[in-house]
Image (tube, rainbow, N blue to C red):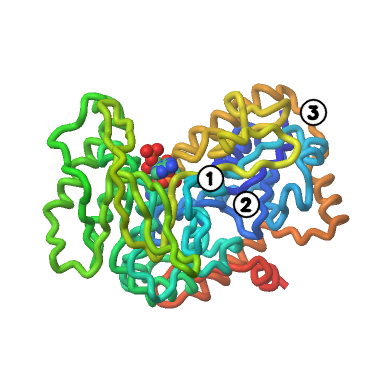
Amino acid sequence: MTLTVAIIGSGPSGMYLADRLAKKLPDSQIDVIDRLPTPFGLVRAGVAPDHQGTKKVINQYEKLFSQPGIRFLGNVEVDRDVTIAELKQFYDAVVIATGAQVDRKLGIEGEDLKGVYGSAAFVGWYNGHPDYRDLTPVHHHIRSAVVIGNGNVSIDISRVLVKEPGEMEESDLCEHARAAIHNAEVETVYLAGRRGPIEASFTPPELRELGKLESAIPVIENTALPDDLPDWVDTSVPEGRVRSKNLEIFKSFQELDASSAQKKIHLLFQASPAAILGNDQGEVRAVRFERTEIDGNGKATGTGEFFEVPADLVVTAIGYRSRALAGVSFDDKRGGYPNEDGLIEENVYVVGWGKRGPSGTIPTNRADSFQVADRLIADLGDGQSKGGPEALNRLLVERGVRVTTAKDWQLIDQLEVNRATGPAPREKLTRVQDMLDSLD
Ligand code: NAP
């Protein structure tokens, strides 16, 4: 049995799907399409620049592109260069693996002030995503930043804001962001969660890192740490054990000496953002929070008591939505694709954050994409073997699209590695035109 499959998106969920399909049906033709000239989605542009170990997974993905049945087609944007309807004509199956790249909104006053960014934009900026290259979120006068949300993304952002240049030397933090962050004088980060420390979505290795920074110390605000876990936490399941470990780590933070710390990360719990406040120039100056109470099930309710913290920069890290693609149903409320175990409609599937919502790490996507790949194979039975790749090639040539290939990526990759200085692993190209020009 062979199939022709178009996968839209070359991040982890798309690459794991390609991997599984290729292993199970080695004669299949799999085209991995990406709107950027460079592959690997969130591993390149989402994973923190100082988490190089996590980025090593790219080596596995790259090997897939050396297999004969798997192609990379970069710089091809669905809805700009080709539609899902066209892909459906060309391929036996189309799989949406575009992730969730749009910031969720808080829906409070002041969210549009200058100096307020969503985490997709902010992380995209420091990671050199071309969409966010021209943002200027960090100025030299920034002293106090507020990061809203208690997930791992909020930890990444807080950490990157306070790390010393030396601590980022071995990272691939892009030069424009490196200069801006290190010229800024961020002394204080408020990392704010609307619920308490037990309810936070942090995972222990990431949380632990906050206690190991050169000049910044985490300080727990606003709440007393409980001696024990509440009844609703079940430590016989992994999630409960994570909460238990987090509590131990929070307790260890209280033993750190913050008195001489140059920088502080205030872990502000039970603080629900009520409004973002600006000055006469429309720039952010503070965030007003409502204190919350946590009930016996970990749910937060407002107490009617408000307080403000100063903010020269606000980053909301409260989750993401997927972007709707034309011609397939989309759940606008949830911000994802309605699906039944990955199936959206006949021959159209979804994997990753577009399927499950914006949660889970790279290994979560692996297991999930494998399941969808197996389902796709079972559903399609004997492939109808539409003429996929050739038909798409013709259409893209007709439309004058400059498609980048896996070989092109190797060239860009090498160029980026060569541009790096000191122990940095690479200096990314951050503009699409520069990437394309580098190939001429
Ligand atoms: P997340 O883990 O879902 O955290 C989102 C946070 O936003 C939660 O604390 C949530 O609070 C809060 N929030 C949502 N709406 C809010 C509102 N209206 N007001 C205030 N707070 C609000 O999401 P994430 O940090 O974006 O991470 C996404 C996924 O990527 C996660 O699975 C994460 O573990 C993973 N990730 C992993 C790593 C790593 O392994 N190093 C790094 C980055 C991301 P409630 O709990 O109260 O809803």
Q: Which mark is residue 384?
A: 3
Position of 300 with respect to 284 (left or right) is: left
Q: Which image quadrant shows ligand 1?
A: top left
- The residue to which callout 2 is attached is 66
- The answer for how far apart the CA atoms under marks 3 and 1 are is 27 Å
Cβ–Cβ under 8 Å for marks 1 and 2: no
Q: Position of residue 329 (x, y in %)?
A: 69, 32
Q: Position of residue 326 (x, y in %)?
A: 74, 40
- The answer for how far apart the CA atoms under marks 1 and 2 are is 17 Å
Residue at the image point whose x is 65% and y is 72% from the top: 434
Position of 224 with respect to 323 (left or right) is: left
The residue type indicated by label 1 comes to: Pro
Tell me: residue 379, above or below residue 20: above
Residue at the image point whose x is 72% and y is 29% from the top: 347
Cβ–Cβ under 8 Å for marks 3 and 1: no
The residue type indicated by label 2 comes to: Ser
Where the N terminus falls, by quadrant? top right
Q: Earlier in the sequence, mark 2 or mark 3?
A: 2
Q: Which mark is residue 12?
A: 1
Could you say which quadrant of the image residue 165 lies in?
bottom left
